Amino acid sequence: MEDLIQQAAIDLVNSKYAIALTGAGMSTESGIRDFRGPQGIWTTDKEAEAKAYKRYDLFLENPKAYWNEMLGEKGTHGAFYREIRNAQPNTGHRGIAELSKMGIIKCVITQNVDGLHEKAGAQYVINYHGTVHKLRCHSCGLRFNFEDVSIDKIPPPCKCGGIIKYDVVHFKEPIPMDIMEQAQDQAMQCDVMIICGTSAVVYPFAGLPRMARQCRGSQLKIIEVNEEPTPLTLDQASDYLIQGKIGEILPEIVRAIERLPITRNEE
């Protein structure tokens, strides 16, 4: 593992445009359970999984019922979102943030809705599946800080006349076009992509590494940091996998970079 950490440090420090892709495994060390792991939320609660698959349809058909489910005492999802909003970054998030502050990682594209990359201090974060810290108008796409929207009236209206929902992208809901375009643009211009804590099975997010590979070819290095191999590993779409706890590996990569007697490319 030490050799791979050293290789990752060299690849990152010599990059011109490195980005990070992160998934649920990034936040498990902050006490946020993943969804599909052995003890994941949906692995252990099939009813919760079934409701998750129907949530966007519920919003479209009955926005008031959607909001009552998200906020009501009988439902657990509102409590789950509140728990996520109170979570704190772990050493993995801080490692990514440090690489961002060093100017090495130019962008973080995350599947996670917890906002922990921002809390840790990452400079530029694209929340691919939205965030529990914001609400979004379903019509005009305008986003609001959660605290800035009154929910005295359910469902909360937007000034444009549309209906506001959580910014979180539910199953069957399209990824907002602005987010999709930003993520694709980042993927197609990077020369190093470090992927942390994602199962690489949820599309279209899982298509970003393959899109980058198709665009950049052998000029792109894809590094995985994960506890288990993914389809990217098995298909050899990534260059190498550093297997282990993300919260331990990322700080080691940062320390390895700090020890390198190399002048980093600032372009």
Image (cartoon, grey):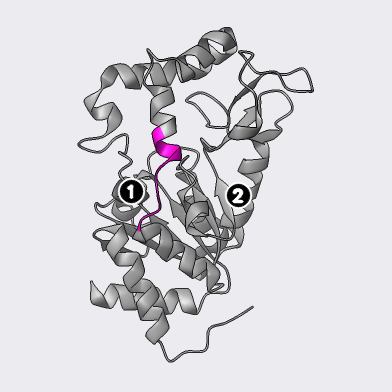
Q: Is residue 173 above or below residue 208?
A: above
Residue under label 2, please give it.
Answer: 184
Q: Which residues are magenta?
A: 83-90
Residue 88 on the magenta segment = yes
Q: Amino acid at mark 2?
A: Gln
Q: Residues within 10 Å of mark 2 (few under 14, many from 20)?
A: some
Query: Residue 185: where, in percent of width, then height?
Result: 64, 53
Residue 175 is tagged as none
Q: Is residue 193 visible?
A: no
Cα–Cα gap, marks 2 and 1: 28 Å
| Residue that protrudes farthest toward the right in the picture | 160
Instruction: Check if residue 187 falls in the magenta segment.
Output: no
* Sequence order check, earlier mark of 2 and 1: 1
Give residue 180's quadrant in the image.
top right
Q: Quadrant of residue 90?
A: bottom left
* Residue 49 visible, this orientation: yes
* Mark 1 residue crowding within 10 angstroms, few (<14) / some (14–19) / many (20+): some
As drawn, 98 above or below 119:
below
Could you say where residue 159 lies in the image, as x and y percent from the top left? Answer: 78, 23
Query: Which residue is disc 1 drawn over?
Result: 30
Query: In this rendering, which labeled residue sits more in front, label 2 or label 1?
Result: 1
Observer-nearest of 154 and 20: 154
Residue 118: give x, y in percent of width and height: 52, 53
User: In which quadrant is the C terminus drawn?
Assistant: bottom right
Q: Residue at x 72, y 19 (%)?
A: 162
Q: Name the residue nearer the viewer: 166 or 145.
A: 145
Quadrant of image for the N terminus: bottom left
Which is more toward the observer, 33 or 204?
A: 33
